[in-house]
């Protein structure tokens, strides 16, 4: 059983991850804006604070915690460059700072698959957060999905034939695997595994490994 402190608990992944962790006996606390406590899934303890400001929640962390950073801009697209910088980068750096201050034993970060020929404004802030995780000497598991399929996120099924064709071409096979699509249940499984198997140093979990979970 782990003590898990989670940011982004009301989001697309967070509201599915919390019940999965609670069912497995973990003690879960989730950062939430004041007044939004009711939006969190049952079974976790709400912690009021601002995901963009480490000073509002760093004191709530302890060295025994696993900090899972999930805050992100919903439904990313190239027009959201400003939000990627303000929200994705801002919350990621705040979480790194809070984890460093508290000396948490394990940091779990949802990054993005890279390199990629598109969505650079989305990728760059997350790469910078990865660099901050390393430079601060945190023990961390970094997951790198490209796109997570699930309710409200189904349009990429239309391009699956393109992935299949790319997988048959030797020069494109590696990129097709690294930038492949993962299902929401696979992502939740990979995150639960990350919580339950704390990394020593940095562990990178790419798309092919995420896909092994069910």
Image (cartoon, rainbow, N blue to C red):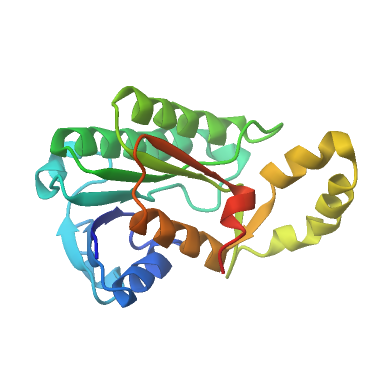
Relative to 66, is 139 above or below?
A: above
> Left or right: where does residue 108 sit relative to residue 182?
left
Q: Position of residue 24 (x, y in %)?
A: 32, 73
Q: Is residue 42 left or right of residue 145?
A: left
Q: Where is residue 80 in the image (x, y as percent from the top left)?
A: 53, 39
Q: In this rendered view, identify the residue nearer to me: 211 or 91.
A: 211
Drawn side of residue 64 relative to residue 162, left or right: left
Above or below 11: residue 138: above
Q: Identify the residue at horizontal 35%, vertical 73% (top origin).
A: 19
Please determine whether, in this image, residue 137 is positioned above or below residue 74: above
Q: Nearer the viewer, residue 61 or 52?
A: 61
> Residue sitting at 52 percent across and 28 percent down?
124
Q: Position of residue 128 (x, y in %)?
A: 44, 26
Tell me the quarter of the picture where residue 1 sits.
bottom left
Q: Position of residue 72 (x, y in %)?
A: 43, 47
Question: Above or below — where is 209 with respect to 40?
Answer: above
| For residue 185, side relative to residue 181 (left or right) | left
In front: 135, or 148?
Answer: 135
Q: In which quarter of the image is the C terminus?
A: bottom right
Residue at the image point whose x is 56% and y is 64% from the top: 213
Q: How many labels does the image show?
A: 0
The residue depicted at 61 percent of the width and 49 percent of the height is 207
Q: Viewer-proximal residue, 35 or 167?
A: 167
In the picture as drawn, the residue positioned furthest to the top comes out as: 135
């Amino acid at each position: 059983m782990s003590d898990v402190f989670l940011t982004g608990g009301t989001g697309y992944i967070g509201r599915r991850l919390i019940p999965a962790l609670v069912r497995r006996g973990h003690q879960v606390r989730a950062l939430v804006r004041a007044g939004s406590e009711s939006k969190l899934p049952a079974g976790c303890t709400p912690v009021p604070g601002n995901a963009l400001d480490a000073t509002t929640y760093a004191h709530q962390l302890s060295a025994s915690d696993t900090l899972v950073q999930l805050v992100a801009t919903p439904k990313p697209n190239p027009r959201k460059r400003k939000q990627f910088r303000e929200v994705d980068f801002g919350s990621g750096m705040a979480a790194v700072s809070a984890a460093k201050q508290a000396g948490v034993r394990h940091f779990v970060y949802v990054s993005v698959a890279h390199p990629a020929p598109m969505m650079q404004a989305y990728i760059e802030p997350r790469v910078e957060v990865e660099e901050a995780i390393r430079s601060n000497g945190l023990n961390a598991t970094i997951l790198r999905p490209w796109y997570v399929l699930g309710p409200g996120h189904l349009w990429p099924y239309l391009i699956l034939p393109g992935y299949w064709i790319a997988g048959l071409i030797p020069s494109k096979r590696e990129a097709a695997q690294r930038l492949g699509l993962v299902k929401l249940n696979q992502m939740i499984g990979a995150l639960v595994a990350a919580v339950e198997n704390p990394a020593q140093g940095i562990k990178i979990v790419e798309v092919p490994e995420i896909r092994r979970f069910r």
